[in-house]
Image: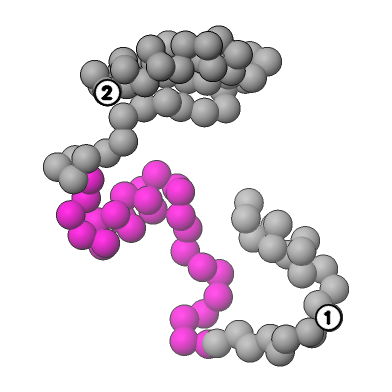
């Protein structure tokens, strides 16, 4: 499990933490005890998926992306300036 640092402590130690990240370590950043971010090495080309299809499959497997609720091939045309009551709420619901 990665070490945890409060945002204030991480800010004071950022240079040191980044040096350790370059060596492969990871850290969790917390705000008021709640984990909100992860400081970790970025994926290199050797560890990243080689194709778009592999990356999409990886994102689907982790639940980071989900299939659209819309039927494929059916375009949605919304004229500019159209008033759509509840659009913001539908957008927010779709993000869940």
Circle 1 is placed at which residue position? Answer: 83
Q: Position of residue 21 (x, y in %)?
A: 32, 21
User: Considering the numbered disc 2 on the image, is that residue within a helix, a strand or a loop?
Assistant: helix
Quadrant in the picture for the N terminus: top left
User: Considering the numbered disc 1 on the image, is that residue within a helix, a strand or a loop?
Assistant: loop
Identify which residue, 4 or 54, lies in the foreground: 4
Name the front one of labels 2 and 1.
2
Residue appearing at x 55%, y 87% in the figure: 75
Q: Which residues are magenta?
A: 48-74
Verify whether residue 65 appears in magenta: yes
- Establish if 49 lies above or below 85: above
Indicate left or right for 61 with 31 as reference.
left
- Establish if 70 lies above or below 60: below
Cα distance between the residues tagged 2 and 1: 50 Å
Indicate left or right for 72 with 43 as reference.
right
Circle 2 is placed at which residue position? Answer: 22
Residue appearing at x 63%, y 51% in the figure: 96
Residue appearing at x 24%, y 56% in the figure: 54
Q: Position of residue 18 (x, y in %)?
A: 36, 21
First in residue order: circle 2 vs circle 1: 2
Identify which residue, 76 or 23, lies in the foreground: 23
Identify which residue, 20 or 64, lies in the foreground: 20
């Amino acid at each position: 499990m990665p070490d945890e640092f409060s945002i204030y402590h991480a800010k004071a130690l950022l240079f040191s933490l980044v040096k350790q990240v370059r060596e492969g370590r990871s850290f969790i950043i917390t705000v008021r005890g709640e984990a909100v971010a992860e400081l970790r090495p970025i994926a290199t080309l050797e560890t990243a998926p080689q194709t778009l299809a592999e990356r999409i499959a990886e994102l689907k497997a982790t639940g980071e992306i989900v299939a659209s609720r819309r039927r494929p091939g059916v375009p949605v045309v919304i004229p500019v300036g159209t008033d759509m009551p509840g659009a913001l709420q539908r957008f927010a619901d779709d993000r869940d």
